[in-house]
């Protein structure tokens, strides 16, 4: 019965010591939790919030930080609470600690506990039962005046409890006072997108954008006018290639402007900064007062669509019988009717490509060009009709238009009419109706002759009042002004020896006997040539000459007058030659005699 009393007292000490240790562990865990939350806040607010921004990296970083907090807190709970909860001290350990706290027991308690336990296990081998009972009675009597529980140290528990309660009250008060920070902290620990409050409240920053290489970029920042309004702001620009960050001042824009905030319209103050030339990809954010935009906005620098290479494939009109040609020059120069296939190789993919023609101030509807599957090659076919210009308008996949597209010249060469010249007789003649005149001619064309003929028109006989009426070979009268009168003629066969012959010369005998004309009529004639142009040939005509038909007597008289005139001219020439010789002889004679030479006779 005495042994049971000692064991009960030992068990009371054990239970109380275990409770004290667990309680101390709980308070230590509370302190650890407060410290870990504070550490999370400091690292998140001073490091993650100001550097990483609202990106996936920020959420992953907060997740790692939160896992570290949970792991550390779990370790503290495991070391300070769980281990103490699972630990069960045996009677010997508790008895030794009691004797250490009460030296006056001099080993009685541990000896009594051990001998009593041994006697119960092995009664025959444990020694004298009377001696053990006597020791047990003595120990019980001696320990009645002792308080075994006073060996438990409560100082650590009290100190930890006071600190834990104090910090808890402080944390709760601070959290209630700055509930905005508390809300943001709890939200960020829950891995939601929350921002910490600042005195200066940023409303909006120009979002990330795509810009053309080398062009200026203007970025605007708006802050709530109800918060703290600094005089200036700063734009941080970080190179996406080198990672170097540069700062640019943002000037304040005069006036206030209503801007849509997260939940409502607010009156905002604006700041503005301009990057003169966007040369490479970069990230930017704004810093104003104690606030900064968490996210780095991406400024993507892209090339505008341009033409890398241009080729023009010419398909000439069929009548030229000319093989197709390809040129790498954008300016076009070709015969009217030529089809040109234009192919533009581009520096990037486009969604639309249009060919815009221009004729002076006239702009026809643009031609939509065909695109390759990857959008980097644009092709179309045009027909050269008249001189002007063209350019290619591009719109790419990044919503950029081509800047200052090149105006290419487009020269339409007309197929000119053949040039026809009569070389002989090349003047009007008076003839009889039996005359046969050789007519020599030359024909030239820029692209080829297809047909040549001698054309003529015979006038009617003089009317009763002596006037002549010009008529065609079929006897029809002259039609309205500007219209070619009907005529007759015949082809000049065997003149052309090859296809698309550009030059020809020949002679044809114009036999007036076949015309059955009478004296007093006139025959107007010319050489006419058609070129190879299709569908309508160009017609060239020589100068027109006239045969005036007279009777034989009149012709004889005219020839006689002409003969006499020629003879008179010959006599005049001979007289002048003789006079010149006589003058020369006198000069020579005077020079031999040394006398001054007489003046030559006047001519």
Image (cartoon, rainbow, N blue to C red):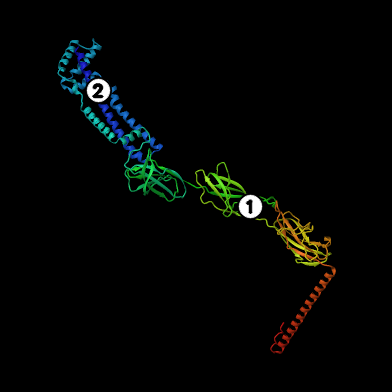
Query: Hey, which residue is sitting farthest front in the picture?
Result: 465
Q: Is residue 214 or residue 317 the one in the foreground? A: 317
Callout 2: few (<14), some (14-19), or many (20+) C-alpha neighbours within 10 Å? some
Q: Position of residue 314 (x, y in %)?
A: 64, 50
Q: Position of residue 538 (x, y in %)?
A: 70, 55
Q: Position of residue 157 (x, y in %)?
A: 22, 27
**How many badges with numbers are in the image?**
2
In the rendered view, would you say 522 is above or below 360?
below
**Residue 93 visible in rendering:** no
Q: Which mark is residue 444?
A: none
Q: Is residue 261 left or right of residue 482?
A: left
Q: Secondary structure at mark 2?
A: helix
Seen at 15% across and 17% down, the residue is: 142
Q: Which mark is residue 19?
A: 2
Mark 1, Cα crowd under 10 Å, few <14 / some 14-19 / many 20+, is some
User: Quadrant of the image for the C terminus?
Assistant: bottom right
Image coordinates for residue 560, horizontal then vertical, percent: 82, 73
Q: Nearer the viewer, residue 377 or 318?
A: 318
State the residue position of label 1.
385
Earlier sequence position, callout 2 versus callout 1: 2
- The quadrant in which residue 464 appears is bottom right
Q: Quadrant of residue 457?
A: bottom right
Task: Please tell me which residue is depicted at 34% across the width and 35% down the height of the picture.
Answer: 184
Local secondary structure at mark 1: loop
- Is 126 displayed left or right of 53 in the figure? left
Label 2, label 1: how far apart the Cα atoms are:
106 Å
- The quarter of the rendered structure image containing the N terminus is top left
Along the horizontal axis of the image, is 43 left or right of 560?
Answer: left
Question: Relative to 173, is 10 above or below?
Answer: above
Q: Is 202 or 476 nearer to us in this picture?
A: 476
């Amino acid at each position: 019965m005495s042994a049971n009393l000692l064991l009960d007292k030992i068990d009371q000490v054990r239970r109380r010591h275990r409770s004290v240790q667990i309680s101390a562990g709980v308070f230590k865990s509370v302190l650890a939790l407060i410290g870990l939350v504070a550490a999370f806040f400091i690292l998140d607010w001073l490091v993650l919030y100001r550097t990483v921004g609202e990106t996936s990296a920020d959420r992953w970083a907060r997740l790692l930080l939160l896992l570290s907090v949970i792991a550390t807190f779990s370790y503290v709970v495991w070391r300070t609470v769980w281990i103490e909860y699972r630990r069960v001290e045996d009677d010997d350990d508790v008895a030794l600690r009691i004797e250490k706290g009460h030296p006056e027991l001099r080993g009685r308690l541990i000896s009594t506990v051990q001998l009593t336990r041994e006697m119960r296990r092995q009664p025959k081998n444990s020694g004298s039962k009377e001696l053990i009972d006597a020791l047990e009675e003595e120990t019980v009597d001696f320990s009645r005046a002792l308080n075994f529980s006073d060996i438990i140290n409560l100082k650590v528990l009290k100190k930890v409890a006071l600190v834990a309660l104090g910090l808890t009250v402080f944390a709760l008060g601070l959290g209630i006072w700055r509930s905005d920070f508390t809300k943001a902290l709890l939200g960020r620990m829950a891995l939601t997108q929350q921002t910490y409050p600042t005195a200066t409240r940023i409303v909006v920053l120009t979002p990330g954008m795509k810009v053309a290489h080398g062009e200026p970029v203007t970025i605007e920042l708006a802050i709530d006018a109800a918060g703290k309004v600094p005089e200036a702001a700063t734009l941080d620009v970080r190179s996406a290639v080198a990672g170097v960050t540069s700062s640019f001042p943002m000037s304040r824009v005069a006036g206030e402007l209503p801007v849509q905030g997260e939940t409502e319209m607010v009156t905002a103050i604006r700041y503005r900064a301009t990057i003169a030339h966007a040369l490479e990809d970069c990230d930017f954010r704004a810093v104003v007062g104690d606030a900064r935009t968490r996210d780095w906005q991406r400024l993507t620098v892209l090339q505008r669509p341009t033409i890398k290479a241009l080729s023009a494939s010419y398909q000439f009109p069929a009548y030229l019988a000319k093989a197709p040609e390809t040129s790498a020059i954008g300016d076009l120069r070709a015969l009217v009717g030529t089809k040109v296939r234009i192919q533009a190789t581009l520096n990037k993919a486009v969604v639309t490509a249009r060919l815009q023609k221009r004729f002076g101030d006239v702009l026809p509807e643009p031609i939509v060009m065909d695109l390759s599957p990857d959008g980097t090659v644009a092709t179309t076919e045009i027909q050269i009709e008249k001189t002007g210009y063209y350019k290619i308008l591009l719109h790419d996949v990044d919503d950029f238009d081509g800047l200052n597209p090149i105006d290419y010249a487009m020269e339409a060469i007309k197929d000119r009419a053949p040039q026809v010249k009569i070389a002989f007789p090349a003047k009007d003649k008076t003839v009889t109706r039996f005359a046969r005149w050789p007519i020599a001619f030359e024909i030239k064309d820029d692209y080829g002759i297809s047909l040549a003929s001698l054309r003529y028109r015979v006038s009617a006989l003089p009317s009763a009042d002596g006037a002549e009426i010009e008529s065609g070979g079929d006897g029809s009268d002259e039609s309205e002004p500007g219209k070619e009168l009907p005529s007759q003629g015949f082809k000049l066969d065997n003149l052309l020896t090859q296809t698309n012959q550009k030059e020809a010369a020949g002679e044809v005998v114009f036999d007036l006997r076949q015309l059955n004309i009478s004296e007093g009529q006139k025959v107007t004639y010319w050489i006419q040539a058609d070129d190879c142009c299709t569908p309508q040939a160009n017609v060239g005509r020589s100068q027109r000459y006239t045969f005036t038909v007279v009777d034989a007597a009149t012709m004889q008289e005219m020839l006689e007058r002409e003969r006499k005139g020629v003879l008179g001219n010959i006599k005049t020439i001979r007289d002048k030659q003789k006079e010149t010789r006589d003058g020369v002889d006198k000069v020579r004679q005077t020079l031999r005699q040394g006398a001054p030479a007489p003046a030559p006779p006047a001519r």
